[in-house]
Amino acid sequence: MGSLTSMNSSADVRRIRQPLAADWDYLYDFIKTTVADARDIYLDKLEFDQLKRENSRLKHLNNVLLLKLGTYCRSDYAGFPDEILLDIFRHSLPPSWLLHETRPMAPCSQDIPSVDLRIKLSILRVCKSWNRVGTGLLYERVTLRRITQLPVFVRALERREELRALVKHVDMNCFVPRGYSKLHEHETKRMLGLCPNLLHVGFSPQFWIPELPHSIPTINSGSITSLEYNSHIPYSNIHPSLDHPVLDFPRLEDLCLTITTDSVVSPLKWRASVRRLWVYGPGANELFDAYGRTILFLRIHSINQQVLDRCPVLEHIAVNSWATALTHPKIRFIDTFTVTVCQDLPFATVKLSSDTFPALSCCRNFDMTMSHFRYVPLSSRESGRKSRGKSSGAEDAVTTFLEFTDPTSVNGAAFIRNDTSGDYVPNPDEDEDDDSEGSEYVLGSDSDDDEGSDTSNSDAASCLATSEDSWCSEEDYWEVGRKEALAIFDRTHENN
């Protein structure tokens, strides 16, 4: 009997423990959930209080901005006429003569063209009115330092018709490796056809492959006032490209050529009244016979009396070496370039030279490094001398975005607006739909970008086929097409 009672008690204990264990688990889960909910409620309250304070602050800031907007007056600087802004901007840029080099050097971030480009790009980012004027400054003088920039620049002109009239000066300073000859020829010809107001065309590559034939496109325009071919392009390469019977340049004033002993200068082909002449190399007598009667400025390595006799109205001459016993009745200014400024001048003083040069008023002796520039002005006023071509004032065209600048700048692809407001209010939350190519303008686009570095892996890759092996014939050269060149530039821009 006692044993039976003990068994019943154990069974009762087990029956009691089972619901108690379940109750403890439920109670533990309940407490845990309650604590978590309390913590979430506390955090939510903290976040709510923080958001409430932030909302109050933003409301106050919004009221302040609304008050400013109600009393906003556009800056007087933004309201200046384009002519005044253009004059101010030109005085903030390096003088134009510092950008004219006899032989372009390898670009760097601290050189004058890069500084010039950075200033121009800074102007573009201020406001719409500044951008409109700065667009003319940026596009009026274009320097192409890489062959891959040429098709991109042509594409920009094809897409934006209003940019074509802005281009006044184009310098082709790009090296043309093997495989890019046809691209260079076709794109240059297309570019010249897209620029109706072109005043200056220069072909001044840093390097040249003598064995690689190049066809310089024919330039036949009544607006051209300046032609330049540096020493890397001999005249023998230029003359065959003149396939027109007569090239009439009624406004041509500046001519830069390299003449060799076998060069043939035909005045019947080059009809022009050249006023400033840069000539390098021997055998230029025919050139002086053709243009000497109108030349006012002459840059030449060495001078003799025969050259002076062929230039009766010459007023300014710049030489590296000077011969004795020279005379000229009209020369007013003489520039010489020597290794050191301490060397003896080829003439003592203006007064002592009065017999041989009666009109002489100024003699300047420069260090040889100054011969790097095409022209050293006599005064700061002369640095902006005007030519017989059209003026390069600001255009009144509608606001356009630039394919050569940062898309986030004023009038970049991110800020295209269909409004008539003169104020510029950027929206930083708006997505950018940019197809811009980055700065390809000197610049530096740079461009700087802006300028960017002008050294690119694309050019390095394109030079892989520049072997001079004798077994490689011209027909075997791989020629890059326009689409391939654009793809190279796009990939390079994306990597940067």
Image (spheres, rainbow, N blue to C red):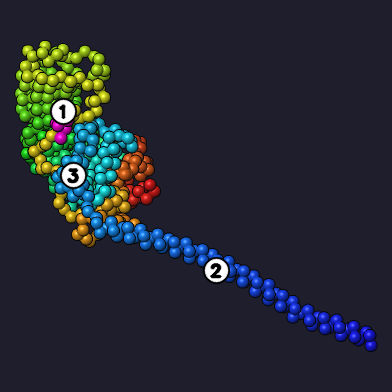
Asked if residue 90 is positioned above or below residue 310 in the image, the reply reads: below
Left or right: residue 38 versus residue 453 is right
Q: Nearer the viewer, mark 1 or mark 3?
A: 3
Please tell me which residue lies in front, 7 or 280.
7
Query: Which of disc 3 and disc 1 is earlier in sequence?
Result: 3
Q: Quadrant of residue 368?
A: top left
Q: Amino acid at mark 3?
A: Leu
Q: Nearer the viewer, mark 3 or mark 2?
A: 2
Q: Amino acid at mark 1?
A: Ser
Element at label 2 = helix
Asked if residue 98 is positioned above or below residue 399 in the image, the reply reads: above
Please tell me which residue lies in front, 237 or 453.
453
Q: Amino acid at mark 2?
A: Ile
Q: Nearer the viewer, mark 1 or mark 2?
A: 2
Residue 53 in view here:
yes
| Label 3 – label 2 distance at C-alpha | 61 Å
Is the Cβ of the residue at disc 1 closer than 8 Å to that at disc 2? no
**Residue pointed to by mark 1:** 379
**Residue pointed to by mark 2:** 41
| Label 1 – label 3 distance at C-alpha | 23 Å
**Residue pointed to by mark 3:** 85
The magenta span reads 378-384
Residue 407 in the image: state x and y as whole percent. 31, 52
